[in-house]
Image (cartoon, helix red, strand yellow):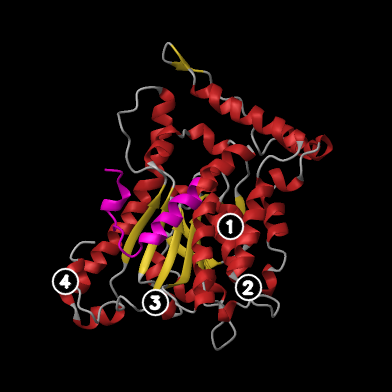
Amino acid sequence: MVNEQKHTKRDEPKRDEPKKVAVGCQGGGIHASFEVGVLCEILEAIEDQNRSKQTRFELVGLSGTSAGALCTLIVWYGLARKNGQAGSPRAAIEQLEDFWERFAATTTAERVLNLFTYSAFRAQEKEVLGFNAPLFGINPRSRISQAVTAGLPLLGVRGRYFDLDKLLGKACPHFKGIDWDNLQTRLLVGASEIMDGVETTFDSDCNMKDQGGKHTAATLNTHRWRKRLPLTLQGVAASGTLPQFREAEKIHGGRYWDGLYSQNPPIRELLSSVRKEHVPDEIWIVRINPQQSAQEPQSNAEIEDRENELMGNLSLNKELDFIMTVNDWITKYGGDFAKDYKPVKVRTIKMRRQTAAELRYSSKFNRSRDFMDLLCKEGHEVAKEWLGLWPDVGCYPEDAAYS
């Protein structure tokens, strides 16, 4: 990172000291299957550390938006202590793999429904004389949509396949039993409040209690257009609410859509925590929206695909650039400023170039098991190689590029 070489040894942990790491996962629909593989490899590395008693890094934070929020929630839930029982990396791996497997089209009816949905998005990408066929869709707020949804279970479609709230409830049955005050890993989830246009982060720090027995949420809110709320399953559902498929999630009088519109994922909040030990030394970004495009988009489908990628990356890069700015301020001003903040390295874990180039916006809706397994396998392979090289790997912004 900029001016990184100017930091003194007191500014950051020594090389042989465990690094505090936070992992941020972008949203990107089914492309998040890659993140499943990456997260499982990180958890495997933590499990290996526990066995060997040689700790290289500690996972102090997780952050996610949309599908990335689903992945990080399940990992966090598996690690968290709940109902008096400790979590573990192995529990987190098993629960994440099980969750993502159940998210795939499994029954015959689900495979047919997925084929229809994915084919509709593919058809929209086909262009004749510069025109695209408009995607036929049903307003999720309409009576017709509600009737179709009510009839899906009769056709053999599991409720968890199309009902995100039900899926999350089944995946995290002991959410209310979380030991909030003794979490070893913090979770941030990004969503967008659409009525007032408020960037919102659902933060596990807000679930902690102060000495008066009240939530700390009020002390963490920043200003009118940016706020933090206690972490809830409803907040995670809000982060994954695309208006084409779900009605806006209603939380505390607000109406929420996908966090892709605001933070993908929340990063800035990682620098301030109720517990200072949760502030990371490094942030690892799992990027599933490629930063670069090999050529200028020409077709309408290519334009739509690139628009979606830019939407997911530009908001993220602004937050990462803010961290770099803070790093510069630490070096430039030192003193009391350096006492309150520490330099944070940002690193990128990304898909292989060819894979990223071949994926399209439509494939973000392809819930076929074969497709999901392919991306998950690549996540395992890329992360295993990356972790084998860490910490001798690149840093943002250079490592976000393929060249």
Figure check: 192 above or below 185: above
The image shows residue 125 at horizontal and vertical percentages of 49, 23
Q: Give, as a three-letter code, the residue at label 4.
A: Lys
The image shows residue 352 at horizontal and vertical percentages of 40, 43
- Element assignment for label 1: helix
| Along the viewing direction, whichever of 93 and 23 lies nearer the viewer | 93
Q: Could you tell me how far apart the alpha carbons at marks 2 and 3 are, in whole angstroms?
A: 21 Å
Which mark sits nearer the N-terminus, 3 or 1? 3
Residue at the spot x=51%, y=59% of the render?
Answer: 41
Figure check: 150 above or below 51: above
Q: Could you tell me how far apart the alpha carbons at marks 1 and 2 are, in whole angstroms?
A: 20 Å
Residue at the spot x=56%, y=28% of the render?
Answer: 121
Q: Quadrant of residue 99?
A: bottom right
The label nearer to you, 3 versus 1, is 3
- Magenta span of residues: 378-403
The label nearer to you, 1 versus 2, is 2
- Element assignment for label 4: helix
